[in-house]
Amino acid sequence: MDIFADFENRVARAIDKLEWKAADGSALDLSRVVVEPPRDAANGDLAVNAAMVLAKQTGKPPRALAIELMGVLAADPDVAETEVAGPGFLNLRLAPAYRAAFLARVVTAGEDYGRGIVTRGEVNVEYVSANPTGPMHVGHCRGAVVGDALANLLGFAGHEVTKEYYINDAGAQVDVLARSAHLRYLEALGEDIGAIPEGLYPGDYLKPVGEALAKEYGTALKGRPESEWLATVRRTAIDMMMAMIREDLAALNVVHDVFFSERSLQDGSAGDRVRHAIDTLTTEGLMYQGRLEPPKGQLPEDWEDREQTLFRSTAFGDDVDRPLMKSDGSYTYFASDIAYHLDKFERGFANQIDIWGADHGGYVKRMQAAVRAISGGRASLDVKLCQLVKLFRAGEPVKMSKRSGSFVTLRDVVEEVGVDAVRFMMLFRKSDAPLDFDFQKVTEQSKDNPVFYVQYAHARTASVFGQARDQLPSLDLTREGLAKAELERLADEGEIGLLRRIAQWPRVVEAAADSHEPHRIAFYLHDLASDLHAHWNRGKDLPQLRFVNVDDPLSSHARLAMVRAVASVLASGLAILGVKAPDEMR
RNA sequence: GGCCCCGUAGCUCAGGGGAUAGAGCGACAGCCUUCUAAGCUGUUGGUCGCAGGUUCGAAUCCUGCCGGGGUCGCCA
């Protein structure tokens, strides 16, 4: 059902038939031969680059090759017109019958059109992984949405996807959380705790934790040394923070399959997994005792030159070798991270994707090096970095201060503008480019607001079907009925344009999935919506082009099939993005 | 200083080997006062940061510069 893939096969067969030979007698390399939509619609439906790509191999001039190829493809009954153009492009125009048959298949497939059939293997997408020390703030939105949409996209493209969240519940920050919660516990017992000391988390969201601790433990945790209550308080606090985070994510329609605890790497039933990871590297001969050069730039105050256990990450493309043990003998965060990624590999994930904030960019090389190292080169990690989101309200920057606690939470944003707007806008930019988010603009009901524009296109298709049912009640508007309409009647350039856009859907899905770039789906949907709206508007001046035309039920039927196809693609595309495809705008 | 990301129209950005580089906003000029529901159409506008290289072909790939941002044992 991918027209371009179909014709790539036909071109390959044509080349075979022509018995083109490489000048040196070796087999022809057809890997660079592609069939794609021409940039300019005037050049037809399909462009074939075979002649240019093969000119050197065959030792023949490109235009001569193109003409030979044209001879074969012109005989194909599914091809209406052929033309050799430019430096050696072979341009094809499809026969109306082929186009009609294509549309019939799309209509029949419905929202499965464009879905990858072949299984493309398992992949693990890890995203969000915010520290369990408080509610999620806006900064987390982008990674959450990008990761979630990417996972949906990969699933649609034919991968088996696991959505995973890594809980950073083992570092010093969760001890700080526990101390902060303990203070709130004392508060809940009626003590005057005064101002929250510098260095502890001041947020009110810890009050319920204090109350819960008071309720469960009474005064048992009071007046005791920290060592006696820390672990208990920490566990309760982390559990409650994670419950809150899950609710925040649910508000964004983000649901993970696996929540993986960092602490479990050391405390879990499987023993010390970090030790296991280090042992794995040691067995491979990748650990050694050595010294590191002090970092360039600003030297840390407590820098001490010492011999330590280093992981030879430079053997896998990293800039310097990395320590896995701190001076006090505990593991570095990187060591835990290696253990975690090794665990993923041992769970069967050779394809791993992590979504990180751009401030972690310096961490990418070493993590990729580690994944290659612990898997013996059998696993690979792709890291998508998400740049910052700048918040605006009617063009004015929104001020935020994390330290004073006056930051905008994820929940604030979702409640103000809705999930759909947040999700769509987070995906309407490449993830590694900064993004401006204007609270005002994303709720406007106008063409300038891409969320509205795309959703409205879907609503408009629903409206068309409503009218069709009223005005042409005799038409069979089921998918089966629409697939049987006289689809060759679709010949207007606006209609052909829409069909061409629809035909691109499978290759957009594939390209977006291969490059791990869900934003391409958002841009494609915007283009498709734009085509639909533009064609609709032509019906204002030219009533004979309208989708529903009482005087011409046969053409109406064919057009409704096309509208059905547009609606299906919009719906499945929006589903990938996690955005609703409404039947009416309110 | 090393590494990573970015540099495309006045603005915000798509395009990541293919033909004359696109969209939205802005600006300018018309149309619409009605019906297919949130206006419509057209015009304007670019040395794709700079310089080399690879290629039949480069905004796209490579190298080096310039400019902006991020980051740089034990934080997470």
Image: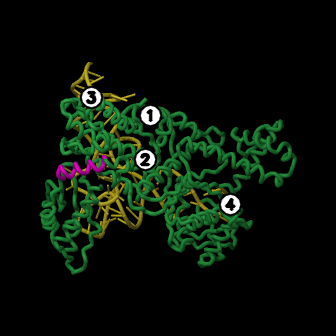
Chain colours: A green, B yellow
- Reply above or below: A70 against A521: below
| Residue that label 3 marks | A471
Secondary element under disc 3, as helix, strand or loop, is helix
State how many labels appear. 4
Q: Is residue A98 magenta?
A: yes
Amino acid at the residue labelled 3: Gln
- Contact, mark 4 vs mark 2 (Cβ under 8 Å): no
Q: Chain of mark 1?
A: A
- Kindly state the secondary structure of the residue where label 2 is placed: loop
Nearer to us: label 3 or label 1: 3
- Asked if marks 2 and 3 touch (Cβ < 8 Å), the reply is no
- The magenta segment: A94-107
Q: Chain of mark 4?
A: A
User: Mark 2 belongs to which amino acid?
Assistant: Arg
Q: Position of residue A297 (x, y in %)?
A: 59, 60
| Distance Cα–Cα, label 2 vs label 3 | 41 Å
Residue B52 in picture, x, y percent from top left? 31, 66
Which quadrant of the structure image shows residue A6? bottom left
Task: Identify the mark nearer the N-term, 3 or 1.
Answer: 1
Question: Label 4, on which residue?
Answer: A264
Q: Could you tell me how far apart the alpha carbons at marks 4 and 2 are, in whole angstroms?
A: 36 Å
* Residue A441's disc number: 1
